[in-house]
Amino acid sequence: MIVLKSPIEINKRLNSFRERKNTIGFVPTMGALHKGHLSLIKRCKSENDITVCSIFVNPKQFNEAKDLDLYPRPIEKDIILLEQAGVDILFLPGNESIYPASYSQPFLNLNGLDNVMEGLARPGHFSGVAMVIERLFYYINPSKAYFGQKDYQQILVIQQILTQFSLDSELVICEIIRETNGLAMSSRNSRLTDEQLKNAGFLYESLLQLNMDVRTLPLSLAIQNAKKSMSHREGVKIEYLEIADRKTLNALETIDQNSEAIALIAVNYFGVRLLDNLFLS
Ligand code: PAF
């Protein structure tokens, strides 16, 4: 695996692969890699000639300094995992090469996606994601980029940014990888104790129950029931639970067989934010 820190250098290297008609797949990450990331890499490798992974803990997308400080950074372990997974190039830029002194934030049109759910809960978060995506995709310009469905709202934001900046990479949405109890894998899970991890399957169970309930109950009542069943659990504070249209994230009041609905949830569980979602069927 080649490790490159300079954006100019990676851009040059990738151009030489492109000249040889190689397709480039990209898995952007903030490190602290888990099985979810490894499944993205596996899919990326199976669909592209060259697999590029980036690790960059993007300060601009953290709206709380404490969250940025606490973000896990097990870089040596990550490098071993990426080598074992067969990644061809690791892009490991420093803050100053992504955001040099000359960097000025471009105008970002997030199409209202920053005004709902994660956008409301974490002001400035999606602008930060948008900024780093514009930078990373500018240098890497992949044929395809791979994201886990867990951060669904983020995927829509990224799609919007690619459209705004006329970047023609294809986004591939990959299924959520879960622990055996159903908890969606996330780098933040490492901040839970073993006991908390063991009990955190309630989040996915609630989504599955909700998927059943919406078939017989009005949506508002199904949501209310799901919230009630979670809120009595120790350590749980529900931030939001919404049923929305998959393309726009506009909240839905009713659904029928033709609706393309998704349920999205965020809870604070013993101080750790957990996200999950489920396409309703
Ligand atoms: O999902 C993440 O890990 C990050 O938000 C991303 C897409 C790598 C941008 O920093």
Image (spheres, rainbow, N blue to C red):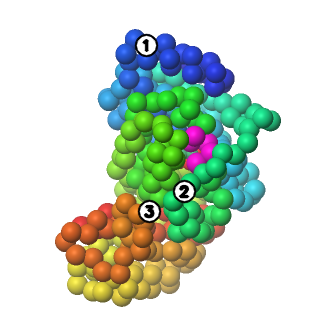
Badge nearest the viewer, 3 or 1 = 1
Label 2: how many Cα within 10 Å (few below 14, some 14–19, many 20+): some
Give residue 110's mark. 2
Residue bearing mark 3: 276
Ligand 1 has an atom within 8 Å of the beta carbon of the residue at disc 3: no
- Which image quarter holds the C terminus? bottom left
Under mark 2, the amino acid is Leu
Give residue 239's mark. none
Q: Quadrant of residue 12?
A: top right
Left or right position of 35 against 54: left
Seen at 40% across and 30% down, the residue is 143
Residue bearing mark 1: 19
Task: Please state the extent of the stretch shown in magenta in the rendering.
Answer: 129-134
In this view of the protein, which residue sits in the foreground, 40 or 101? 101
Q: Where is residue 104 drawn, in percent x and y?
A: 73, 42
Distance CA(mark 3)–CA(mark 1): 40 Å
